[in-house]
Image (cartoon, grey):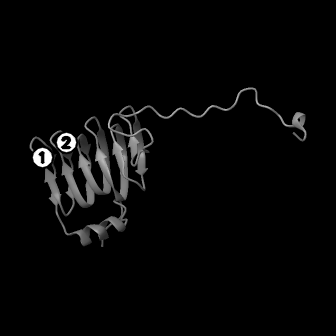
Amino acid sequence: MWNQEATPKLATPPQPQAPPAAIPGRQADERRVVAWVGKSVVFTGQLKSSEDMTIDGRVEGSIELRDHALTIGPDADIRADITAKVVTIFGAVTGKITAREKVDIRETGSVEGDIISPRLAISDGAVLRGKVDTENKETTDQRMHRAVPTNMPRA
Protein backbone atom coordinates (compact mmCIF):
# COMPACT_ATOMS: atom_id res chain seq x y z
CA MET A 1 0.00 0.00 0.00
CA TRP A 2 2.59 2.60 1.02
CA ASN A 3 5.58 1.63 -1.02
CA GLN A 4 4.97 -1.85 -2.25
CA GLU A 5 7.93 -1.89 -4.60
CA ALA A 6 10.39 -1.23 -1.72
CA THR A 7 9.30 -4.38 0.09
CA PRO A 8 11.27 -7.41 -1.16
CA LYS A 9 9.13 -10.37 -2.12
CA LEU A 10 10.24 -13.95 -1.71
CA ALA A 11 10.06 -16.09 -4.79
CA THR A 12 8.70 -19.00 -2.78
CA PRO A 13 7.34 -18.74 0.75
CA PRO A 14 9.34 -20.66 3.38
CA GLN A 15 7.98 -24.14 3.91
CA PRO A 16 7.49 -25.47 7.42
CA GLN A 17 9.91 -28.21 8.49
CA ALA A 18 8.49 -31.69 8.17
CA PRO A 19 7.95 -33.34 11.54
CA PRO A 20 10.40 -36.12 12.41
CA ALA A 21 9.39 -39.59 11.36
CA ALA A 22 6.97 -41.09 13.80
CA ILE A 23 8.39 -43.71 16.13
CA PRO A 24 5.99 -46.53 17.00
CA GLY A 25 4.45 -45.95 20.42
CA ARG A 26 5.48 -42.28 20.49
CA GLN A 27 3.48 -39.20 19.56
CA ALA A 28 4.89 -37.16 16.66
CA ASP A 29 5.32 -34.04 18.81
CA GLU A 30 6.96 -35.85 21.74
CA ARG A 31 10.61 -34.94 22.32
CA ARG A 32 13.23 -37.43 23.43
CA VAL A 33 13.58 -37.20 27.22
CA VAL A 34 16.90 -39.02 27.49
CA ALA A 35 20.22 -38.73 25.68
CA TRP A 36 20.88 -41.68 23.39
CA VAL A 37 24.04 -43.22 21.95
CA GLY A 38 23.08 -45.34 18.94
CA LYS A 39 24.41 -48.83 18.25
CA SER A 40 26.62 -47.65 15.39
CA VAL A 41 28.43 -45.16 17.67
CA VAL A 42 31.85 -45.90 19.18
CA PHE A 43 32.83 -43.45 21.93
CA THR A 44 36.26 -43.40 23.56
CA GLY A 45 37.01 -41.16 26.53
CA GLN A 46 35.12 -39.57 29.42
CA LEU A 47 31.36 -39.43 28.80
CA LYS A 48 29.41 -37.13 31.15
CA SER A 49 25.72 -36.29 31.05
CA SER A 50 23.38 -34.20 33.16
CA GLU A 51 20.31 -36.08 31.95
CA ASP A 52 19.18 -39.70 31.75
CA MET A 53 20.95 -41.68 29.03
CA THR A 54 20.54 -44.85 27.00
CA ILE A 55 23.57 -46.41 25.33
CA ASP A 56 23.22 -48.97 22.55
CA GLY A 57 26.71 -48.51 21.09
CA ARG A 58 30.25 -49.04 22.35
CA VAL A 59 31.89 -46.90 25.04
CA GLU A 60 35.48 -47.23 26.26
CA GLY A 61 36.69 -45.05 29.15
CA SER A 62 34.31 -43.73 31.79
CA ILE A 63 30.62 -42.82 32.02
CA GLU A 64 29.37 -40.35 34.62
CA LEU A 65 25.69 -39.52 35.24
CA ARG A 66 25.86 -38.78 38.98
CA ASP A 67 22.21 -37.81 39.50
CA HIS A 68 20.63 -39.59 36.55
CA ALA A 69 19.69 -43.02 35.22
CA LEU A 70 21.75 -44.98 32.71
CA THR A 71 20.34 -47.78 30.56
CA ILE A 72 22.74 -50.10 28.75
CA GLY A 73 20.90 -51.50 25.72
CA PRO A 74 21.04 -55.15 24.59
CA ASP A 75 23.48 -54.39 21.73
CA ALA A 76 25.80 -52.24 23.86
CA ASP A 77 29.42 -53.12 24.58
CA ILE A 78 30.65 -51.02 27.49
CA ARG A 79 34.27 -51.13 28.62
CA ALA A 80 34.16 -48.34 31.14
CA ASP A 81 33.79 -47.45 34.79
CA ILE A 82 30.24 -46.22 35.40
CA THR A 83 28.92 -43.76 37.99
CA ALA A 84 25.16 -43.08 38.02
CA LYS A 85 22.07 -42.86 40.19
CA VAL A 86 20.46 -45.99 38.68
CA VAL A 87 22.05 -48.39 36.17
CA THR A 88 19.93 -50.85 34.15
CA ILE A 89 21.90 -53.35 32.08
CA PHE A 90 20.58 -55.30 29.09
CA GLY A 91 23.97 -55.54 27.29
CA ALA A 92 27.60 -56.20 28.23
CA VAL A 93 29.58 -54.13 30.74
CA THR A 94 33.22 -54.59 31.69
CA GLY A 95 34.27 -52.22 34.46
CA LYS A 96 33.40 -50.95 37.92
CA ILE A 97 29.82 -49.76 38.48
CA THR A 98 28.96 -47.32 41.27
CA ALA A 99 25.25 -46.53 41.62
CA ARG A 100 23.74 -44.27 44.25
CA GLU A 101 20.40 -46.11 44.29
CA LYS A 102 20.29 -49.35 42.29
CA VAL A 103 21.92 -51.62 39.72
CA ASP A 104 19.56 -53.86 37.74
CA ILE A 105 21.09 -56.57 35.54
CA ARG A 106 18.40 -57.89 33.21
CA GLU A 107 18.17 -61.37 31.64
CA THR A 108 20.33 -60.43 28.61
CA GLY A 109 22.82 -58.39 30.66
CA SER A 110 26.32 -59.25 31.79
CA VAL A 111 28.77 -57.48 34.09
CA GLU A 112 32.42 -58.27 34.53
CA GLY A 113 33.62 -56.00 37.33
CA ASP A 114 32.82 -54.82 40.82
CA ILE A 115 29.51 -53.23 41.79
CA ILE A 116 28.96 -50.71 44.59
CA SER A 117 25.28 -49.97 45.18
CA PRO A 118 22.81 -50.11 48.08
CA ARG A 119 20.46 -52.25 45.92
CA LEU A 120 21.16 -54.91 43.30
CA ALA A 121 18.69 -56.87 41.18
CA ILE A 122 19.79 -59.76 38.97
CA SER A 123 17.32 -61.44 36.61
CA ASP A 124 17.41 -65.12 35.66
CA GLY A 125 19.94 -65.55 32.86
CA ALA A 126 21.99 -62.47 33.78
CA VAL A 127 25.74 -62.88 34.33
CA LEU A 128 27.83 -61.21 37.04
CA ARG A 129 31.56 -61.79 37.58
CA GLY A 130 32.91 -59.52 40.29
CA LYS A 131 32.57 -58.32 43.85
CA VAL A 132 29.39 -56.68 45.14
CA ASP A 133 29.34 -54.10 47.94
CA THR A 134 25.83 -53.09 49.05
CA GLU A 135 26.84 -50.29 51.39
CA ASN A 136 24.19 -47.84 52.53
CA LYS A 137 23.08 -44.90 50.39
CA GLU A 138 24.85 -42.22 52.47
CA THR A 139 28.21 -43.97 52.16
CA THR A 140 27.70 -44.43 48.41
CA ASP A 141 26.82 -40.71 48.08
CA GLN A 142 30.01 -39.75 49.92
CA ARG A 143 32.10 -42.06 47.74
CA MET A 144 30.55 -40.72 44.53
CA HIS A 145 31.16 -37.08 45.46
CA ARG A 146 34.79 -37.36 46.48
CA ALA A 147 37.14 -37.79 43.62
CA VAL A 148 40.24 -39.73 44.61
CA PRO A 149 42.54 -40.44 41.66
CA THR A 150 43.38 -44.13 41.45
CA ASN A 151 47.11 -43.43 41.11
CA MET A 152 47.33 -41.48 44.40
CA PRO A 153 48.64 -43.29 47.49
CA ARG A 154 46.04 -43.70 50.21
CA ALA A 155 46.76 -42.65 53.79
What's under tag 1, amino acid-wise? Ser
Where, by quadrant of the figure, is residue 98 drawn? bottom left
Q: CA distance from mark 1 to mark 2?
A: 9 Å
Q: Quadrant of the C terminus?
A: bottom left
What's under tag 2, amino acid-wise? Gly
Between residue 58 and residue 90, name the one nearer to us. Answer: 90
Q: Which residue is mark 1?
A: 123
| Residue at point 39%, 40% (across, down) | 27
Q: Which mark is residue 109?
A: 2
Q: Quadrant of the N terminus?
A: top right
Between circles 1 and 2, the one closer to the viewer is 1
Callout 2 secondary element: loop
Between residue 114 and residue 57, name the one nearer to us. Answer: 57
Question: Mark 1 packing: few (<14 Cα in 10 Å), some, or many (20+)?
Answer: few
Q: Earlier in the sequence, mark 1 or mark 2?
A: 2
Where, by quadrant of the figure, is residue 134 drawn? bottom left
